[in-house]
Image (cartoon, helix red, strand yellow):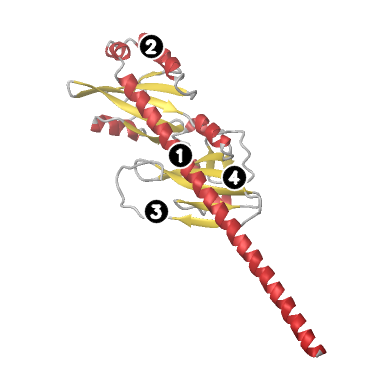
Amino acid sequence: MKTLNKTVFILLVITALALSILFYKLTLINKSNNLINNLENAMTTTRYLFEEQKRYALSLSIILAQDKELIDSFKQKNREKSFEVVNRKIKLLKKLQNSQIDVQIHNKDLSTYLRSWNLSIKDIPLESFRHGIVKAHKDKKPIVSIELGKRLNIKAISPLVENNKIIGSIEVIIGFEYLEQELKKEGLDTYILLKNKFLNIADTLKENTKIGQYTLVNDKNKEIEPLKSEVLNQLKDYGYFTNENKAFSYFSIYSFKRERLGYIIISLANNDSIKIYKSYEKNRSIKSEGVLIE
């Protein structure tokens, strides 16, 4: 009888231990699934906000491209008047959304006519590295993207067409500050990374913080300790990864030539120190030109 009781006791202990392990694993799986859901939601929110900002920039460029006062000063090559008009318009447009807005106007030969932040800059050739301007002039259609220039930011370009001929174009440039603020309200930190090899073009970013082969675009003072260069070197098109305290979702930024420029990475708290690493390549047909966020 004692042997039977001892056997029953041992079986109960083993069963309790097995159930505890099973409960622990199920809890861990549930927490892991919840974290992945949160990361997917963060990625969806970020994509939506980026697309919303792109539409906003495109709307502004179309509005400015139809502004008679601005176009008349451009056709007259009165740069001082254009500078005054465009900055007055920017002041009005900023009332719609408190974003940093810059405007660049291009000549038909794809050189700089005017920059809203510096009247002295003009006649800079842009064709060799500003593929969005080339495409807008070629197609005679507005275009918007995250594009590489002296900076990496959202650029919306509307061609100026007269008698079915291109006479120039207007570009609205919006940075990432507003997006960061909106994501911060959701408890999300944003890291926008550019490959170092593109700093010969984006030379205004040369002094920004470096993380291995990447440069932090959006905030020189941002805490980068959560990001490790060895992890960044393993990233693909999109996915998720974690460290002890943070969880990250990311997606790629591509050029018009289908070359990966860098990544947009969003982070949130990883309170349970869950380990996740999922990285994916997109199946796509290769095109000579395409969207920049994927």
Label 4 crowd bin: few (<14), some (14–19), many (20+), radius 10 Å: many
Q: Mark 4: which amino acid?
A: Leu
- The residue labelled by disc 3 is 282
The residue wearing badge 4 is 268
- Counting residues from the start of the chain, the first of labels 1 and 2 encountered is 2
Residue in the foreground of this view, choosing between 208 and 24 = 24
| Label located before the other in sequence (4 or 1) | 1
- Badge 4 vs badge 3, beta-carbon distance below 8 Å: no
Per the image, the residue denoted by label 1 is: 198
Q: Secondary structure at mark 2?
A: helix
Left or right position of 97 against 211? left
* CA separation in Å, label 4 and label 3: 24 Å
C-beta proximity under 8 Å, tags 4 and 1:
no
User: How far is disc 4 from disc 2 in space, using C-alphas?
Assistant: 43 Å
Reading the chain from its start, which is encountered first: label 2 or label 3?
A: 2
Q: Quarter of the image containing the N terminus? A: bottom right
- Three-letter code, disc 3: Lys
| In this picture, residue 234 sits left or right of residue 76 | right
Q: CA distance from mark 2 to mark 3?
A: 44 Å
Q: Assign the C terminus to one quadrant of the image.
A: top left
Farthest-out residue, right: 2
Residue 241: % across, % down: 56, 53
Q: Give the CA separation, mark 1 to mark 2.
A: 34 Å
User: Is label 1 or label 2 in front?
Assistant: 2
Q: Hey, which quadrant is residue 53 in on the image?
A: top left
Badge 3 crowding class, 10 Å Cα cut-off, few under 14, some 14 to 19, many 20 or more, is few
Q: Residue 51: x and y, percent? A: 41, 37
Please state if 124 lies on the left or on the right of 251 as rendered. left
Residue with the mark numbered 2 = 85
> Callout 2, which amino acid?
Val
